[in-house]
Amino acid sequence: MKLLLSCSGGMSSSLIAEGLEDEAKKRGLKDIKVDAVGADEVADYLNNDHYDAVLLAPQAVYRKDSIAAEAKDHSVPFLLIPRNLYSPLGSSKLFDIVKQKLTDKE
């Protein structure tokens, strides 16, 4: 599983990415990678690699329409992260939501 986490910048996104990777490993899923990138970089990342989902940090909601359109153009599910789960403590529930989104896609 490979996820693209987009944000408006800052250290919090890398902490969320690490939290999601750690949660996956706790559940026995070793093949997971979460790339945390700025909102301006999403198109480049999607053009250069395959991702299973694009996640958008709540503080970058102003970019929701453009990021969702970019994800749709690449046939990749898009998810706006709920504000209450955008912390390392929310990794377990956020991981559940991501897995459900990917299951619904199939």
Image (cartoon, rainbow, N blue to C red):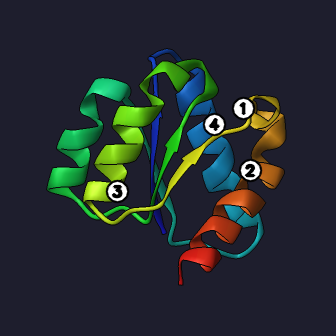
Q: Pointer 2 and pointer 1: residues touching (CB < 8 Å)?
A: yes
- Residue 84 at what x, y percent from top left? 82, 31
Q: Quadrant of residue 49?
A: bottom left
- Residue 19 at what x, y percent from top left? 68, 44
Residue wearing tag 3? 72
Task: Please give left or right for residue 19 compared with residue 43 in the image.
Answer: right
User: How busy is the neighbourhood of tag 4: few (under 14 within 10 Å), some, or many (20 plus)?
Assistant: many
Tell me the residue at 76%/62% (across/down): 96
Type of amino acid at the residue the image marks with label 1: Tyr
Type of amino acid at the residue the image marks with label 4: Ile
Precedes in sequence: disc 4 or disc 2: 4
Tell me the residue at 48%/19% (across/down): 62
Between marks 2 and 1, how big is the CA–CA gap?
Answer: 8 Å
Between marks 4 and 2, how big is the CA–CA gap?
Answer: 10 Å
Label for residue 16?
4
Tell me the residue at 76%/71% (across/down): 27
Q: Is residue 89 above or below residue 4?
A: above
- Residue 76 at what x, y percent from top left? 38, 62
Type of amino acid at the residue the image marks with label 2: Leu
Q: Quadrant of residue 59?
A: top right
Q: Pointer 4 and pointer 2: residues touching (CB < 8 Å)?
A: yes
Residue lying furthest bottom = 106
Q: Pointer 1 and pointer 4: residues touching (CB < 8 Å)?
A: yes
Tell me the residue at 42%/25% (across/down): 63
Precedes in sequence: disc 3 or disc 1: 3
